[in-house]
Amino acid sequence: MADPGTLIIDNNSPYWLTFTVPQGDDWWNCCDAPKPGFSVRVGPKTKSPGFTFVRTDGHGCNGRQGQFSMNPNMPTIDSTNQKFWFDSHGGLEFQGPNPNYVSQLQQIAGGAYVWTVTPPA
């Protein structure tokens, strides 16, 4: 059974932002959570509660990375998706091209990951 991981979103902006796993995204695969349509609303200069990501076992996913993307709605730009991939032990990484905003990922004590997002002014 795959180990779940935890992702916390740090909204480093003066705006309320909603982060959504897009419906019909071609970068969602071997992922039990989060599902397409999942969203998290995060206040200015605050962090979200942690949410779970977990890779699908079996179904052709053994030996493959789980993957999902999230898109923050930003009032200053038409933001692009940040792509993530992760292993069966809850290890999370960015994948693909950089989005059109500052995006950083850091693992913290206890094993959770913090994704810090800074929109352009």
Image (tube, grey):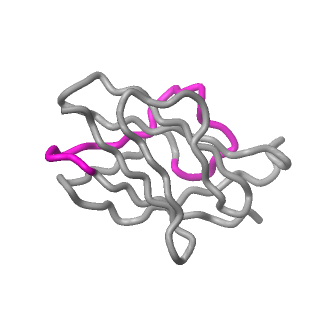
12 lies left or right of 92: left
Residue at (37, 51) in percent of width and height:
116
Q: What x and y, as percent, mark residue 57?
A: 77, 54
Instruction: Give 116 or 30, whichever is nearer the viewer.
Output: 116
Residue at (36, 46) in percent of width and height:
39
Classified by dominant secondary structure, the portion drawn in magenta counts as: loop
Q: What x and y, as percent, mark residue 24?
A: 52, 26
Q: Quadrant of residue 29?
A: top right
Instruction: Give 4 or 109, whichever is nearer the viewer.
Output: 109
> Which image quadrant: the C terminus?
top left
43 lies left or right of 60: left
For residue 93, above or below residue 6: above
Residue 121: within the magenta?
A: no
Q: What x and y, as percent, mark residue 12?
A: 26, 50
Q: Which residues are magenta?
A: 12-34
Residue 22: within the magenta?
A: yes
Q: Quadrant of residue 68?
A: top right
> Which image quadrant: the N terminus?
bottom right
